[in-house]
Image (tube, rainbow, N blue to C red):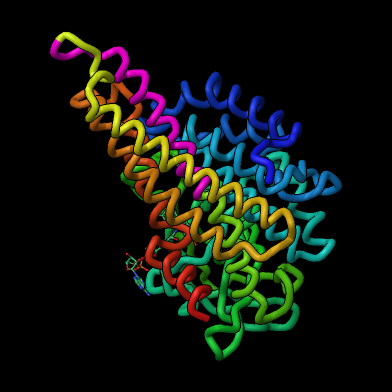
Amino acid sequence: MRFELTEEQQQVLSMVRSLARKTIAPKAAEIDEESSYPEDNMRLLAELGLLGMLFPASYGGSEAGATAYSIALREIAGGCASTAVGMAVTNMVGETIWRFGNEEQRKRYLPGLASGSSGPGAFALTEPSAGSDAGSLRTTAVEDGDRYILSGGKVFITNGAFAGVTIVAAVTQKDPRKIGAFLVEPGTPGFSVGRAEQKLGLKGSNTVSLTFDECPVPKRNMLGNNGDGFRILMAALDGGRIGIASQAIGIANSALETATAYAKERRQFGQAISDFQAIQWMLAESATEMEAAQLLAYRAAWLKEQGRPYAREASMAKVFASEAGNRACHKAVQVLGGYGYIREYPVERHLRDIRVTTIYEGTSEIQRIVISRSLLK
Ligand SMILES: Cc1cc2nc3c(=O)[nH]c(=O)nc-3n(C[C@H](O)[C@H](O)[C@H](O)COP(=O)(O)OP(=O)(O)OC[C@H]3O[C@@H](n4cnc5c(N)ncnc54)[C@H](O)[C@@H]3O)c2cc1C
């Protein structure tokens, strides 16, 4: 067993950490304050090959592997969590098109996603009445000659208003589990985007509803075969969960770093608050939990790279990292006292940003179902 990064992974770490600290982090408070989509950051990520990390160079990607991707996403999330979620969904969409798309689809969409020229990717599964229960979709795709007609609506879609391509899940047959995954481009007749949601955190990320009003999508835009959609989307979410674990670790690490530095500076009762055991224990607990989360995320990423089953490990990493990360951000606010609660310090933003990591790409309850099913089967 080797607990060391490869030379390439080390290079990704030092390049992305420096970018995140010098360029991304300084803009994060403003992006949050103004709820503005981080277009400049996304452009920078594209220039550095960070939007196509999971598919080959022949399609414009950097094929860095799941571990390097997890490292990069963690570092970007430590700088600006809103930017990280845009990066995560774009990489997930690119990887899904690469894995399940045909040659024409790969050539058509992957270079634009990696270079940023087409805009980011979006992944549209959730509907008003189908959240955790992703098998109960109501959006339909009815065959009509050489196209499908999509009707229905999606909610909470990250990157939705800016996406160059959106993977849309729709029921194609009478059996609601027979789902198709469609590649939908902006400007398709009948496809419209709702207003951006006002959120607790990740305020710079774009979260919108999508409507499909008799929207014609060519048959050639279906990923895989009719009925493959559920399997494709669940496979995408398995990989996505390593991403959300990494995002949570990055946010929590930043909060812990601020709390540690503050504890050494802040004096009360004639001494640094870091001299109080109560403060030391909060820092120690957060550091230990985030280390454990990191190992779970690395293990899931490594299994994925080996081509071995990793769905259970990805769920374990996601549920543990998101819950431990929430605890670490909560403690960081506590260490800063009143200063943790105001905008002068970043930990209140970290606490708001990390909250959603136990909810999206499968809630903690759904992760526990995935894990227990694999134990009990
Ligand atoms: C900021 C943000 C971005 C998002 N981005 C995307 C995106 O890009 N694409 C996309 O498709 N979706 C996206 N989502 C949607 C997200 O994945 C869903 O919100 C999530 O899956 C939960 O669905 P729901 O909100 O309908 O909650 P529900 O499914 O209604 O769950 C409500 C509660 O019930 C619990 N629950 C449900 N079923 C069970 C069960 N069987 N056992 C125990 N407890 C259960 C849940 O865990 C939760 O606590 C996003 C959401 C947010 C907030």
Q: In terms of secondary structure, what is the magenta stretch mainly? A: helix
Residue lying at the far bottom in this picture: please name it: 174
Residue 12 falls in which quadrant of the image?
top right
Magenta range is 245-269
State which image quarter holds ligand 1. bottom left
70 relative to 135 in the view: left or right: right
Is residue 248 inside the magenta stretch?
yes
Judge whether 30 appears above or below 132 on screen: above
Question: Which residue is found at the position 51% from the left and 66% from the top?
Answer: 125
267 relative to 68 in the view: left or right: left
Question: Which residue is found at the position 60% from the left and 38% from the top?
Answer: 71
Residue lying at the far left in this picture: please name it: 269
Is residue 168 inside the magenta stretch?
no
Residue lying at the far front in this picture: please name it: 1
Coordinates of residue 117 in the picture (x, y in percent): 70, 40
Residue 334 falls in which quadrant of the image?
top left
Question: Which residue is found at the position 46% from the left and 79% from the top?
Answer: 136
Q: Is residue 37 visible?
A: no
In the image, 269 versus 29, the foreground residue is 269
Judge whether 84 appears above or below 269 on screen: below
Residue 41 falls in which quadrant of the image?
top right
In the image, 344 versus 213, the foreground residue is 344
Judge whether 302 appears above or below 71 on screen: below
Coordinates of residue 25 in the picture (x, y in percent): 48, 25
299 relative to 341 in the view: left or right: right
Coordinates of residue 357 in the picture (x, y in percent): 42, 50
Judge whether 179 appears above or below 343 on screen: below
Coordinates of residue 8 in the picture (x, y in percent): 75, 34
